[in-house]
Amino acid sequence: MTAQEIISFFNAHPEFFDEHPEILNQLTVPHPLNGQAISLTERQLLTLREKLAQVQGKLAELVSFGEENDVIAEKVHRLTLSLLQAESFEAVNFAVYNHLQEDFAVPHVALRIWNSILKRPVPEFIEVSEELRFYAADLRQPYCGAAQNQEILAWFGEAAPLLRSVSLIPLRRDAQIFGMLALGSEDPQRFFPEMGTMYVERIGDLVGAAVLKQIG
């Protein structure tokens, strides 16, 4: 009798083991790890334990993600409060750099503003190239990945040669881009293409709104 014939027999006679329960206790199968013969009941128990461990692992992962999201959300909330309390561009600027570097542990932060009638003798208002403006306008979402754009890298000064990954967040006034928030790290995996951008987009929206409130 072939294996398929045996399978077909049991499929056709599902009541077989109800009528002959003693056979279940006599059946043995190889242990999945050491190959020793174990009862069918014990093998089923091992399978259930494996599935339970997988479920517990996925649950722990979900809890971890949830806790991590809660921590990030709290940091975004603190940044939001600071930006709401800012009464000048200088205060906005300080809140952005301070929270991103201290609270979010982003080692390098750079902010640039263009298309503004308000000019200040600070790095944030240094003119950028037309090519960079076009690049920013083409971003539909924050860029996360390798540090490649040399003009943007120059914003980070002496740290530029050390940066391995960046997040480039366009600042928008409706559909128009009026600036960029750039985050840099020496860690090539800090910002990577597959990472979620929900929170960095939210930060970009907050910073953009706070900047516009002060510069018009």
Image (cartoon, rainbow, N blue to C red):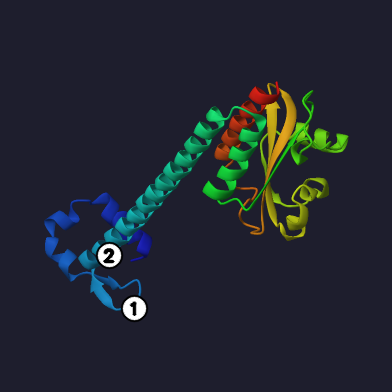
The x, y position of residue 9, in whole percent, is 28, 56
Residue furthest right as drawn: 130
**Residue type beneath disc 1:** Asn
The reply to whether discs 2 and 1 touch (Cβ–Cβ < 8 Å) is: no
Q: Tell me which amino acid carries mark 2.
A: Leu
Measuring 26% from the left and 66% from the top, which residue is drawn there? 43
What quarter of the picture does the N terminus occupy? bottom left
Image position of 144 with respect to 35: above or below: above
Q: In this view, does 4 lie above or below 149?
A: below
Could you tell which of marks 2 and 1 lies nearer the N-terminus? 1
Badge 1 marks a residue whose secondary structure is: loop
Residue at the (53%, 37%) spot, across then down:
79
Relative to the observer, which residue lies in front, 94 or 29? 94
User: Which quadrant does the C terminus fall into?
Assistant: top right
The quadrant in which residue 125 appears is: top right
Q: Mark 1 points at which residue?
A: 34
Residue 205 drawn at (x, y percent): 61, 30
Instruction: Give the CA distance from mark 2 to mark 1.
Output: 13 Å
Residue marked by disc 2: 46
